Image (cartoon, rainbow, N blue to C red):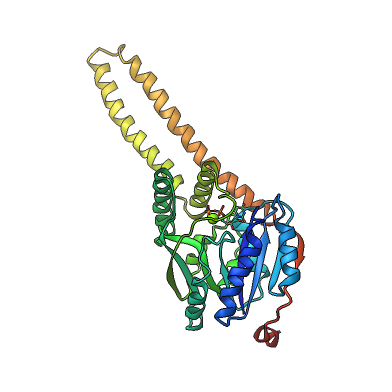
Amino acid sequence: MLSVILPAYNEEKMILRAAKTVGGVLEEAHIVYELVFVDDGSKDRTWEEIVSAAEKDEHITGIHFSRNFGKESAMFAGLANAKGGCCVVMDCDLQHPPETIPEMYRLWEQGYEVVEGVKKSRGKESPLHRASAGLFYRILSKAVKIDMSRASDFKLMDRRAVDALLAMPERNAFFRALSAWVGFRSTSVEFDVRERTEGESKWSTWSLIRYAVTNIVSFSSAPMQFVTFAGIGVFLFGILMAIQTLFRYFSGAAVAGFTTVILLILFIGSIIMISLGIIGYYIAKIYEEVKARPRYLISKKIESRIRDAAMEEKT
Ligand code: UDP
Ligand code: MG
């Protein structure tokens, strides 16, 4: 069975449409499926929509969070509650084309364990957004050592890869990169990002910046190396200044140079503060991980009534 995981936050208008469209595509391709809607603590009627859709459609599983935990948590909750032998994660605003799922499924049948959806085009975006997304992915690609520039959250994963992901204890999990990190036999399919038809994007510029910083930090300790390099730089500069100062002292012109002292204090002071900030950020993340709070809390759940013969046999 194929489980399609659809995280939804304030998507009341999209639930029914997504269920119908995705269901239709999968019926047509003769794929046994379930739809796992994860309501990420929506403030509108999303959960009511999921409940009413689940009453009519036996393929639907619904999970309701006690509050908004973010898309990463929603995807993990979906994966943890999926019963399928393989799972597809996609946005429930249908920006990821459902027609691509059968293609991914066929590749899975051929033995691929991770099928990445790769963006052929990025859809409509402002130039600034495009530029900053470009920078983020360049840094991240370096950190993960895999090209992430066209990566998306749209992907199919085999049960084995899903279980490997779920076994990871980290709180700040970055799904998009972790699915590449786990390895397994993988391939990719291209897709075009569609326009959103209803509602609006949940991302503000500020939340995107936070998303970028959190994920770079969760995958790379390079910013901390900055501290070392800045230290080395300042040290070398310091040697030059020391030579100059000593030279002045011995040539008897030592009083001048107050400007230099002020500049040095400002320069070194700001480097130290930036460095402390970077280290502090990592400590904050360590603190979060050490507390080991759950990634999400489920307050309500509806089970799909669809059964998978292959899975039943195993248990
Ligand atoms: N989403 C979520 N929790 C959040 C924000 C978003 O589950 O806190 C879901 C949202 O409902 C959608 C998907 O994540 O299905 C992608 O969100 P959105 O369309 O706002 O992002 P964009 O397509 O603009 O990157
Ligand atoms: Mg979207």
What residue is rendered at 57% in x and 66% in y? 89
| Rendering quarter of residue 86 | bottom right
Q: Quadrant of the C terminus?
A: bottom right
Please tell me whether residue 109 is drawn above or below residue 190 in the rendered image.
below
Answer with the quadrant where ligand 1 appears in the image.
bottom right
- The answer to whether residue 73 is seen in the rendering is yes
Residue extending furthest toward the left: 251
- The answer to whether residue 167 is seen in the rendering is no
Report x, y in % for residue 66.
Answer: 74, 54
Report x, y in % for residue 191.
Answer: 44, 66
Report x, y in % for residue 280.
Answer: 55, 40
In this picture, residue 282 sits left or right of residue 123: right
Q: Quadrant of the N terminus?
A: bottom right
Please tell me whether residue 148 is drawn above or below residue 213 in the rendered image.
below
Report x, y in % for residue 8.
Answer: 64, 58
Q: Who is closer to the viewer here, 138 or 78?
A: 78
How many circles with numbers are drawn on the protein?
A: 0
Q: Who is closer to the viewer here, 230 or 152?
A: 152
Q: Who is closer to the viewer here, 176 or 163?
A: 176
What residue is rendered at 30% in x and 12% in y? 256
Residue extending furthest toward the bottom: 313
